[in-house]
Amino acid sequence: MKYELAYREKVVNEVHSRMVYTCCPGWKQKDLSDTGYIDECARNGTLCQHKCINNAGSYRCECEDGFTLDSNGRTCKFCLTCLSEYDELVKGYRGLVKRVMQLENEKVC
């Protein structure tokens, strides 16, 4: 069996000198003359923990800010260094520690 990409994403399969229309993975046949696109994300809302990005014949998962995709490619785990505000948080924390140290040194007993 040989797949060839043809007009409107149809796959043409040549068998015993006659043309047979079949679909690539991720596509479904509507009728004998047309194929339709399958949206895996819409069909199954539990594929990805955060965001499901559909593409031709497949899908991919993405995570919200502050999370990273786990090795299973579907779930997300918290990642402090992945936060877009991480550098600002570290800078603020260091400034706070410095100020606390100054106040500690200024104590009068």
Image (tube, helix red, strand yellow):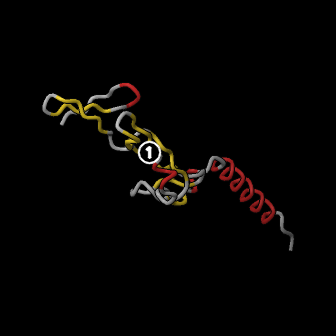
Depth order, front residue of 19/51: 19
Q: Amino acid at mark 1?
A: Ile
Position in image of residue 31 (x %, y %): 38, 40
- Quarter of the image where the C terminus is located: bottom right
Residue in the picture at 70% in, 56% down: 93
Residue in the picture at 31% in, 33% down: 11
Depth order, front residue of 97/78: 78
How many neighbours does mark 1 have within 10 angstroms: few (below 14), some (14-19), or many (20 or more)? Answer: some
Which residue is denoted by mark 1 in the rendering?
38
Can you see residue 27?
no
Position in image of residue 19 (x %, y %): 23, 30
Depth order, front residue of 79/64: 64
Tell me the quarter of the picture where residue 14 sits: top left
**Residue at the right extreme, as displayed:** 108
User: Left or right: 15 with respect to 61?
Assistant: left
**Residue at the left extreme, as displayed:** 16
